[in-house]
Image (tube, rainbow, N blue to C red):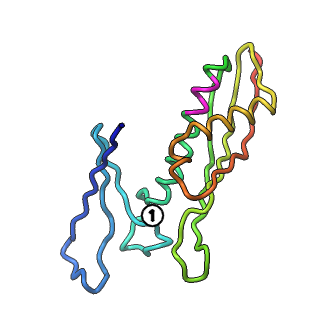
Amino acid sequence: MTTYSAHIDWQRQGEAFTDNRYSRVHRWQFDGGLTVPASPSPFSVRPPFSDPANIDPEEAFVAAAASCHMLCFLYLAARDGYVVDSYQDAAEGVLEASEPGGPRWITRITLRPHVMFSGNKSPTDAILADLHARAHHDCFIAHSMRGEVVTAGSWEYLKE
């Protein structure tokens, strides 16, 4: 078993608090020393009580799923002898309620990776689809989610 941790730090900055007009801006601190400015999404809490420049939990959730998929994909591509030069993803998560007035949840994350390959071995569309399917299978973040993860990407092969 492996344990992961994060330290979340929020401090009231003199606001009354009980009137619900307080800043929700906070920090995430990780064991490697990185501190990330965080905030609720401005779609959930309007500025100035949120900060749109900071990462919000919903964005982090989508980024975690996309990053996990990418890392699994890169590992599998390398193991199968494909040279990946770049991997870019414009991932998008959908937050919605399953019924009117019901709780909201991330129902779907769409990954849109654009992968550039080079080297002596060029993948076919079928091989690329298989790499993505195996990456999804290996991604523990995807297995930790209730919503679906869809891959709708593209690729290029750069002949050396």
Is 128 on the left-hand or right-hand side of 12? right
What segment carries the magenta color? 72-77
Location of residue 125 in the rendering, given as x and y in whole percent from the top left corner: 81, 33
Location of residue 147 in the rendering, given as x and y in whole percent from the top left corner: 59, 58
Residue 139 is covered by the magenta coloring:
no
Type of amino acid under label 1: Pro
Q: The C terminus lies in which quarter of the figure?
A: top right
* Residue 99 picture quarter: bottom right
SS at circle 1: loop
- In the rendered view, tell whether residue 81 sits above or below residue 97: above
Location of residue 87 in the rendering, given as x and y in whole percent from the top left corner: 62, 34
> Viewer-proximal residue, 18 or 148?
148
Return the residue at label 1: 52
Farthest residue toward the left? 14
Callout count? 1
Magenta residues, dominant SS class:
helix
* Residue 37 picture quarter: bottom left
Farthest residue toward the bottom? 19
Residue 73 is covered by the magenta coloring:
yes
- In the rendered view, tell whether residue 131 sits above or below residue 22: above
